[in-house]
Image (spheres, rainbow, N blue to C red):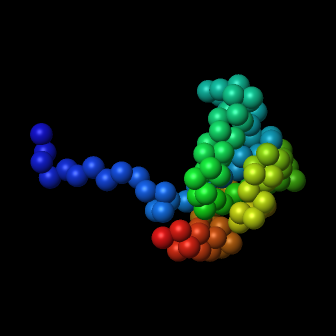
Amino acid sequence: MNSAFKYNRLDKNDVAVLLVDHQTGLTNCVQDFSPDDFKNGVLAFASAAKYFNLPTILTTSFEEGPNGPLVPELKEMFPDAPYIARPGNINAWDNEDFVKAVKATARSSC
């Protein structure tokens, strides 16, 4: 056994939750779960983030197209969270507003 390994427990003060593109049209594209099971899993995860008061960022891509709008329950759950719509932008890291929000959220949670 490697005695140099030290287990560090996760700390809610060192995390942020990023919910990327949980949109109504995309929930139907998930192959591993039914759309309802997938959506309920995402909402359960989001509820845990809300319970622990974790900083949360919401994003969407191509809302006006087939991806559709953000799942409404997420916007209701996090009305004050940074919300970054990325029309025509597949890679979230290519969006300046997204990168700024992630950096600001990381700074405010540390």
Q: Is residue 109 visible?
A: yes
Residue 10: x and y in percent read 41, 52
Farthest residue in the right direction? 64
Q: Is residue 26 above or below residue 35?
A: below
Q: Residue at x 56, y 73 (%)?
A: 108
Residue in the foreground of this view, choosing between 47 and 72: 47
As drawn, is 68 to the left or to the right of 7? right
Judged left or right of residue 86, residue 53 is left
Q: Position of residue 85 (x, y in %)?
A: 77, 62
Where residue 49 appears, as percent x and y from the top left, is 61, 50
The residue that appears at 69% across and 41% down in the rendered structure is 43
Q: Is residue 21 above or below residue 88?
A: above
Q: Nearer the viewer, residue 40 or 30?
A: 40
- Estimate the x, y position of residue 66 in percent, counting from the top left: 83, 44
Q: Please indicate whether residue 16 sits to the left or right of residue 27 in the image.
A: left
Which image quarter holds the N terminus? top left
Q: Nearer the viewer, residue 36 or 23?
A: 36
Is 40 situated left or right of 68 in this image?
left
Residue 39 occupies which quadrant of the picture? top right
Residue in the image at 70% along x and 57% along y:
58
Asked if one can make out residue 103 in the rendered structure from this viewpoint, the answer is no
Residue drawn at x 75%, y 40% is 26
